[in-house]
Amino acid sequence: MIPADKILCLAHEHDRAPRNPRVPPNFCDRLATCARHQAISRVPFDGTHTAMTRVCQPGKHDAYIPLEGNDGECGNQ
């Protein structure tokens, strides 16, 4: 479980302009192995955690937290 002081990540970029609903948003390539994203489905929805559309900067993984047991190298391709 991720600590409450860490911001959770929805793993997609937020568009400033209205987006065509037929075109999906750009998702992070590490969402499957990121503890910030995977915790969204595991933590209670009680206000103890906050979430952002994208915690890392687009194209970077500066705030990436690997899942336990993951070496952190998945998604580097």
Image (cartoon, helix red, strand yellow):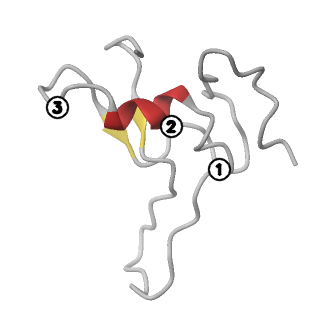
Which x, y percent locates residue 3? Answer: 38, 11
Residue type at mark 2? Val
- Of tags 1 and 3, which is closer to the observer? 3
Identify whether 15 is placed above or below 55: below
Left or right, residue 36 beside residue 26:
left
Q: Which residue is mark 2?
A: 55
- Of tags 3 and 2, which is closer to the observer? 3
Which x, y percent locates residue 55? Answer: 50, 37
Helix, strand or loop at mark 1: loop
Identify whether 68 is placed above or below 56: above
Residue type at mark 3? Phe
Residue at 32%, 29% (x, y): give it. Answer: 42
- Distance between the Cα atoms at labels 1 and 2? 9 Å
Q: Which residue is mark 3?
A: 45
Q: Nearer the viewer, residue 21 or 74?
A: 74
Q: Are marks 1 and 2 in contact (CB under 8 Å)?
A: no
- Distance between the Cα atoms at labels 3 and 2? 19 Å
Q: Which residue is mark 1?
A: 58
Helix, strand or loop at mark 2: loop
